[in-house]
Image: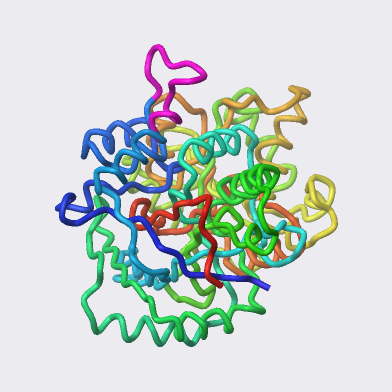
Amino acid sequence: MALIAPFRGLRYNPKLVKELSLVMAPPYDVISSEGQRTFHASHEQNVIRLILGEALAGDDAVRNQYSRAGDYFRRWQTEQVLIRDPAPAVYLYQQTFQLPGAGTLTRDGLIGLVRLEEFGNRTVFPHERTMGAAKADRLRLMQACHANLSSVFGIYSGRFLELDRLAAVAEESKPTIDLTDWDGIRHRVWICQDREAIGRLQMECTSTPIFIADGHHRYETALAFRDLMRTKEKGDPAQTQRRPYNYIMMTLVSAEDPSLVILPIHRLLRHLPGGSLDGYLAQLARQLTVERLPVPRDPESAASALLSHLRQTKDGTHCFGLYGGEERAYLLTLTDEQALEAKAEEDKSPVYRRLDVTIVHALLIEGSWSRQGLGDLPEDALSYTHDAAEAIRLVQQGGWAAAILLNPTKIAEVQAVAEAGLRMPPKSTFFYPKLLTGLVIHPLMPDEVVEV
């Protein structure tokens, strides 16, 4: 069962930080190098200095971006830039945003602590593969700061009636935090310290599994950090099991929330396996129908045209857009179902075999590469973006040979893959909007216990 708990969050002091939007940032893994510089320049106390500090000339094993993050984190608390809430609380989090074709949407979530569980316990489910380098990076940061600086994004089936009630009540009151970010997304946070209401929430979620939407690397890093801390802990087991390092800050959103949006993540190919676009298309034609589509040169218009064709795909049909430069665009439709059986990495689960992202990697990317006898796909041969127009623009600029556009993964597919104990390929989902980093921080105080 999932165990959630309140906590005394660290938040920016509004008396010292007058414009909160200037100190916020997205999750670290969606920030580009240019974005990193922009957020560093926006405010000297932007949370970017904690989650994604700049590497400097002369850095070494002792003095580096991780040690500087720890220094900033401690100094900002000493200087009261970051202050702790006086009592344990859960935080009601609401995001209001625009989505083309859907208008204005509002997504409600709950920020609280979730007890860390091994994935095999069937309480918390992952759905994407993780990479060792990213986990090592996050572990060094966690060791330097002893905090959950960013919230993991979790989804759950059904509804928490108490959460719906609290959200309805909160909307009638003034939020503690109310800001609009650089993308025009409004973020509002209300603090709930009502122990009875929190108790009802805890009762509701005791039999509810949680699926990680975003934050797989941070979750697995927290597990590793927990294990390291347990080796050092010498106290009463009844107390040590309730230490904050046994928990992780998570924002929980219902899978039934109509404003839970998943955007596709498109692929960029550095080189074409067939040696040319025509050679590549000839390869693909063995298993997919290839239909030429007229598209304008303008990246926005070309992306809109390709995505419009993909959105018209019938359920059960697997279609992909391919852009190869200039006005060369194609609609690729899978015709050879047996190719799936032969190429899919996970042959035990039909739901995995029939994911668009699985098919793309098995047939259009890794499969096409291996058929040329070229060995493993080089690390720099593939890139990702959720912006279709940007993918087309990068191909036009000459750095990439082709872009593969996809339909979004469905939330039911995410849950089905996770429940089957499988992992999707990296960058299979892009939940939108991202949770804002800097709203609340969970400090892992060594002498405290979590109130459950």
The structure residue drawn at horizontal position 51% and vertical position 48%, both measured from the top left corner, is 265
Image quarter hosting the C terminus: bottom right
Q: Quadrant of residue 394?
A: top left
Image quarter hosting the N terminus: bottom right
The majority secondary structure of the magenta stretch comes to: loop
Residue 121 falls left or right of residue 127: right
Position of residue 70 relative to residue 1, above or below, is: above
Identify which residue, 302 or 376, lies in the foreground: 376
Residue 56 within the segment the image draws in magenta: yes
Residue 124 is situated, as x and y percent measured from the top left of the image, at 66, 63
Residue 20 is situated, as x and y percent measured from the top left of the image, at 22, 53
Q: Which stretch appears magenta?
A: 55-69
Identify which residue, 184 or 249, lies in the foreground: 249
Residue 360 visible in rendering: no
Q: Quadrant of residue 158?
A: bottom right
Residue 4 falls left or right of residue 48: right
Residue at the limit of the structure toward the front, as seen here: 235
Position of residue 448 relative to residue 401, above or below, is: below
